[in-house]
Image (cartoon, grey):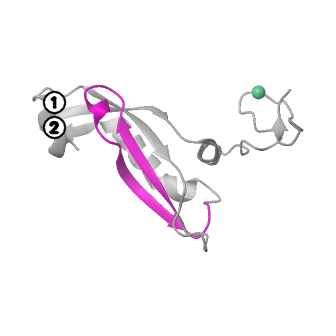
């Protein structure tokens, strides 16, 4: 990204890159369970925040991953290392910071190892038990 769009920074590199990450399942075909789970990344801060998200990796399986570690483990290892050592570019060390993850409810449940958003105990912040009223609601 820096090689492609770095000229837009006018030779002034930020000292910190804060990123927002995303992952979500995308079906490959309706007739099979084949699906891909891309891990994407986007700069949080201006001026790079206008840049398009970019793909860090793509996981493919014939069903939804049962365990997010199946496909996030390598990503997390590399991210931890980058947070510790920084990113070297043009002789300068740039600090890498995770600003957050932005995922839809099913992907959020998968990566946090919590109940899916349709579950009776799906609130990630309390222990309320939902009731069924055409759908699960929390009164
Ligand atoms: Zn709650």
> Residue 60's spot in the image, x, y percent?
50, 66
**Residue at 62% of width from left, 61% of height from top?**
64
CA neighbours of label 1 inside 10 A, class few (<14), some (14 to 19), many (20+) = few
**Picture quarter with ligand 1:** top right
Left or right of 14 in this view: 27? right
Residue 104, quarter of the rendered image: top right
Q: Can you identify the residue that label 1 sits on?
A: 9
Q: Secondary structure at mark 2?
A: helix
Per the rendering, the mark at residue 76 is none
Q: Residue furthest bottom?
A: 31
Of 83 and 135, nearer the camera is: 135
**Relative to 54, does residue 64 appear above or below in the rendering?**
below
**Residue at 17% of width from left, 45% of height from top?**
4
CA neighbours of label 2 inside 10 A, class few (<14), some (14 to 19), many (20+) = few
> Residue 63's spot in the image, x, y percent?
62, 66
Look at the image and tell me in which quarter the C terminus lies: top right
Tell me the distance, in whole angstroms, between the alpha carbons under discs 2 and 1: 5 Å
The answer to whether mark 2 and mark 1 are in CB contact below 8 A is yes
**Relative to 89, does residue 16 appear above or below in the rendering?**
above
Per the rendering, the mark at residue 6 is 2
Tally of numbered discs: 2
| Extent of the magenta region | 36-64
> Residue 90's spot in the image, x, y percent?
12, 38
Residue 57: say if magenta: yes
Residue 110 in view (yes/no): yes
Residue 68: say if magenta: no
**Residue at 16% of width from left, 37% of height from top?**
6
């Amino acid at each position: 990204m820096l090689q492609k769009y770095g000229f837009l920074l006018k030779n002034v590199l930020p000292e910190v890159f804060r990123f927002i990450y995303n992952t979500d399942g995308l079906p490959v075909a309706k007739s099979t369970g084949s699906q891909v789970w891309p891990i994407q990344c986007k700069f949080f801060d201006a001026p790079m925040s206008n840049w398009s998200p970019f793909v860090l990796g793509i996981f493919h399986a014939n069903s939804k991953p049962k365990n997010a570690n199946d496909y996030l483990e390598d990503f997390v290892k590399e991210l931890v290392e980058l947070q510790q050592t920084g990113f070297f570019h043009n002789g300068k060390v740039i600090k890498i910071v995770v600003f957050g993850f932005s995922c839809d409810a099913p992907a959020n449940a998968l990566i946090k190892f919590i109940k899916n958003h349709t579950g009776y105990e799906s609130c990630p912040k309390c222990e309320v038990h939902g009731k069924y009223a055409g759908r699960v609601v929390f009164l």
